[in-house]
Image (tube, rainbow, N blue to C red):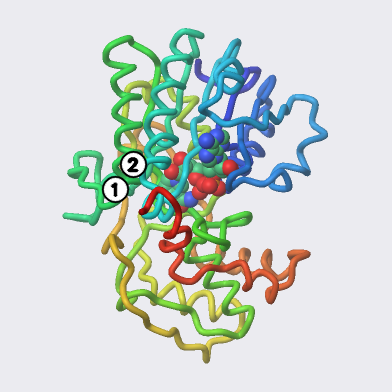
Amino acid sequence: MSTLQGATVLVTGGAGFIGSQLVRELLDREVASLVVVDNFVNGRRENIEERMADPRLTLLEADIRSDVALDALRGIDVVFHLACLGVRHSLHAPRENHEVNATATLELLERARHESVQRFVHVSSSEVFGTAQYAPMDERHPTWPETVYGGAKLAGEAYARAAFRTHGMPTVVVRPFNTYGPRSHFEGDSGEVIPRTIVRVLNELPPLVYGDGEQTRDFMHVRDTARGLAMIAECDEAVGETINFGSGSEISINELARTVASAAGRTEIEPTYLEARPGDVRRLLVDGSHMHDLTGFTPEVSFGDGIEELVAWFQTRPESPEAMLTRIEERNWLVGAGNEESK
Ligand SMILES: NC(=O)c1ccc[n+]([C@@H]2O[C@H](COP(=O)([O-])OP(=O)(O)OC[C@H]3O[C@@H](n4cnc5c(N)ncnc54)[C@H](O)[C@@H]3O)[C@@H](O)[C@H]2O)c1
C-alpha cells in the first residue's frame, strides 16, 4: 500500500470540518471509491455537497456505533477514522464522549481487522498531552490529558497501537494539533476560537479572550492537515507509528485576535478579557520532525494568509454575520450543562 490512487477508502466523520477537506483531497488523489460515514451530529451534508455528484462518493448517514457503519468496512482498503465528539462536549457529557471517542474506536478497529483493511489511520489529537511540559512537543512527551476528551482520544490511540502490536494490523496514529480553515465550527459547543473570533469581528464586536491571552496553540490550515493525512496513509514506514502533526509555529490567542482584526480591516478592535476556561491547556507546539522524516511533509499555508483567506470565506457565506453570531455560545464548555449526564 503506497498509494491512495485506485484504493477503496472509508472516512468516518467525513462530513465534518477536517473530514470534508480530506474527502476533497482523496477524490483529487483518484481513489477508486470513497464512503463517508457520518451521523451529522456536528457534520453537515453541505460540507461535501459540491462533491456529491462524483459517482465514487457514497454518503452513509449512520452512527459509527451502529452495525450498518461497521458493515461498511467490508471491501475497504484504507480507513481514516475522524468521527468524534469534541472537547467541550466532554465537559458536560463525559460518558457519551468516551463511548464515541474510545469504545467505538475499539469496535471499528476490531471489525477493520477482520475485514483485512490495509491501512487504518487513527486521527487522535494533541489534547492527549495536556499542557506542554516542554516545547516543541515530540512523540515522547508525556500524555497527561486534562479532559475526558483527551483521555478518550488517548484510549483510542492506545487501541490502535495495540491492534498493530498484538495482531500486526497496519494502523497508524496521528495527532493533529489545532486546525483552522473553511467549514470550521463557530457554533454551539463545537465552536473553535478562530471562527468565533472572526464572526465576532465581522459583527464589529471585540474578540473574547478567556484568561490572559498568552496561552498558545499550533494552528495549521485544513488544506495542509488533509494533505498530511493522505501522505501518512501512503507512507509504508508510518505503519505502527504515532505521529505528532502540526505547523510548528506557536501563536498566542492575543496574536490570533490581532491577526483576525487586521485581516478584517478592524485594527482598532481590542479584545475583551474574561475568566480562564477550566482545563484550558497553556501551551501547544509541535515538534514535526518525525512527520517530516517519514513523509517529507511541510506546511504550505502561512497563518497570516490562512486567516486572510478565512475571513474572506466567512464574508461570502450565505448566512449573515449577524445570524452566525446568534449561533455562537459564549462559554461553550457549559453548553448542555443541565443535561442528564451531568447531574
Ligand atoms: N479541529 C481540530 O483542530 C482538531 C485538532 C486535533 C484533532 N482533531 C481530530 O480530528 C478529527 C476531526 O475533527 P473536526 O475538527 O473535523 O471535528 P468535526 O466535529 O467537524 O468532525 C467530526 C465528525 O464526526 C461526526 N460524528 C461524531 N460522532 C459521530 C458518531 N457517533 N457517528 C458518526 N459520525 C459522528 C460529526 O458529525 C462530525 O461530522 C477528530 O477526530 C478530532 O479529534 C481535530
The residue at the point 42 percent across, 30 percent down is 122
Determine whether 34 is above or below 248 in the image.
Answer: above
Residue 287 has which mark? Answer: 1
Report whether 129 appears left or right of 219: left
Q: Where, quadrant-wise, is the C terminus in this rendering?
A: bottom left
- The residue lying toward the viewer, choosing from 36 and 173, is 36
- The residue lying toward the viewer, choosing from 25 and 315, is 315
View extreme (right): residue? 53
Residue 99 has which mark? Answer: none
The residue at the point 50 percent across, 15 percent down is 1
Local packing at callout 1 (Cα closer than 10 Å; few below 14, some 14-19, many 20+) is some
Residue 222 place in picture, x, y as percent: 54, 50
- Find residue 134 and report its image quarter: bottom left
Local packing at callout 2 (Cα closer than 10 Å; few below 14, some 14-19, many 20+) is many
The residue at the point 39 percent across, 77 percent down is 254
- The residue lying toward the viewer, choosing from 277 and 80, is 277
Q: CA distance from mark 1 to mark 2?
A: 7 Å
Judging by the rendered image, the residue that carries numbered circle 2 is: 244
- Residue type at tag 1: Asp
Report whether 82 appears left or right of 69: left
- The residue lying toward the viewer, choosing from 38 and 308, is 38
- Residue type at tag 2: Asn
Residues under numbered marks 1 and 2 in contact, where contact means CB atoms less than 8 Å apart: yes
Which secondary structure, mark 1? Answer: loop
Q: Is residue 226 visible?
A: no
Report whether 135 appears left or right of 2: left
Residue 226 place in picture, x, y as percent: 54, 41
Q: Earlier in the sequence, mark 1 or mark 2?
A: 2
